[in-house]
Image (cartoon, coloured by chain):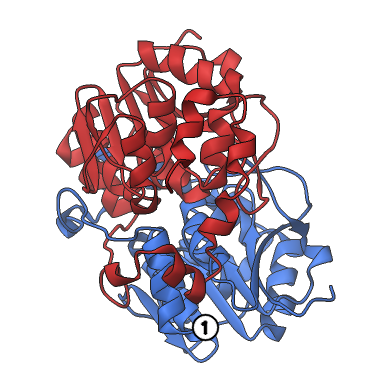
Chain colours: A blue, B red
Amino acid sequence: MKTDEKIIAFLLYPGLSLLDMVGPYSVLSNLGRGYRTVVVGEQADSIPDDFGLGITPHFSIDEMPEPDILIVPGADLATFTTMANDKLMNYIRTAGEKAEILASVCTGACILAAAGFLQGRKATTHWAYAPYLEKLGVDYVKERWVEDGKFITAAGVSAGIDMALHLAARLADVDASKAVQLYCEYDPPPPFGGPDWTMANEADISRASAVNLSERLADMKTVLANKPDLLALFNDN
Amino acid sequence: MKTDEKIIAFLLYPGLSLLDMVGPYSVLSNLGRGYRTVVVGEQADSIPDDFGLGITPHFSIDEMPEPDILIVPGADLATFTTMANDKLMNYIRTAGEKAEILASVCTGACILAAAGFLQGRKATTHWAYAPYLEKLGVDYVKERWVEDGKFITAAGVSAGIDMALHLAARLADVDASKAVQLYCEYDPPPPFGGPDWTMANEADISRASAVNLSERLADMKTVLANKPDLLALFNDN
């Protein structure tokens, strides 16, 4: 693709957590300054998010082989089904190798690690997936986002917004980041204060909401049956 | 539609600001507790967001005439093109009249007001659109979200996340809201602090980013040429 703009590509895959992508996409799409955001998928057809909403990417991965910046969102189950998808994993490997910046949101860090990135580096992910990231040889850090060389990883879901404001300042400048922040009116006061970290276990969040992480993870050994290196993720969990 | 669940419907329309929808959608989709989130569009075909990404709704508006809760996201230009779309406006009028809760994010409040709701009530919207909301007879309040009877309006874009956590607590309970907050890891520390409100004018945000609000609004008088009541929105601006 011939363009004077640098391309920021988000990888869309079946079952992703949509806010992981749309948070930073909304920030970076308003950046301007010679950057263009695109969403790429295995095919340029409608791809379902984690609640069955269909998203049609701007391009297929074949049409966008060398983005300047690649951002991989997270998921729950689809973290592992993506690891089992050779075409997507090969794209992450080859495009991620060439990209100036390779970033992730939420469990996207686990996907990057399964693709062979981040080993021995500092990175972060969704709190519930930290053990998986560590089993993949990554030095997990509980921060909102972590930058280690060309790798920028964000914590769970909404952390992608904060990471993207940081990335906007790195790519353009702080004024551009603050202009986009104002336009997105990112002035967060969560109505009941910060997260209640005493609930940060599967039993408590599953009891209080529709989040059923353990149940949803049960079949993942089967999904990864042909990936012996990754099956170790499910030992001792 | 026969179901034991209460339906929370988001109205998807061409050109919407995707984060307006996906923020609260991500919160409420994880709520459970007898609530189901759906996205409805004029047709159940792919509909472009403000950056040309295609979103396929779960249902057409004809398939979902009476959601229990209706949430209308915002946009910039598409705020006005939606006002000129009789089918969407009729849907908002009839479904909104019957809904237990009628909510908006960002300029969705302007759309609700153009549909005949909110007159004489307190409501909020994106800071740059407050003058339009006031011209539509609404008592604009600069808050993160405002509840007035069955109407809940959120400020710009990302404010939908905070509003949705409030709504989750109203629909279920505070524990459910906090569980979803933790799962979405909504623990925001914007990297450069809160918004810089001294940049809250079109010239400054346009200079620093790709946001070109004035330019983008120039054609809206033509779009609303057949809606004399709404043309007054563009007087003295």
x, y percentage for residue A96? 67, 79
Nearer to us in this view, A100 or B47? B47
Q: Position of residue A162 (x, y in %)?
A: 38, 69
Going 15% across and 56% down the picture, which residue do you hit? A198
* B190, above or below A45, in the image: below
Residue nearer the viewer, A162 or A45: A162
Chain of the residue that carries numbered disc 1 in the rendered image: A
Categorize mark 1 by other alpha carbons within 10 Å: few (<14), some (14-19), many (20+).
some
Q: Could you tell me the amino acid type at mark 1?
A: Ala
Q: Residue furthest top?
A: B2
**Above or below: residue B188 compared with residue A34:** above
For label 1, the residue is A172
Q: Can residue A159 be seen?
A: no
Write down the quadrant of residue B41 in the picture: top right
Q: Position of residue A126 (x, y in %)?
A: 38, 63
Residue at position x 37%, y 10% in the image: B98
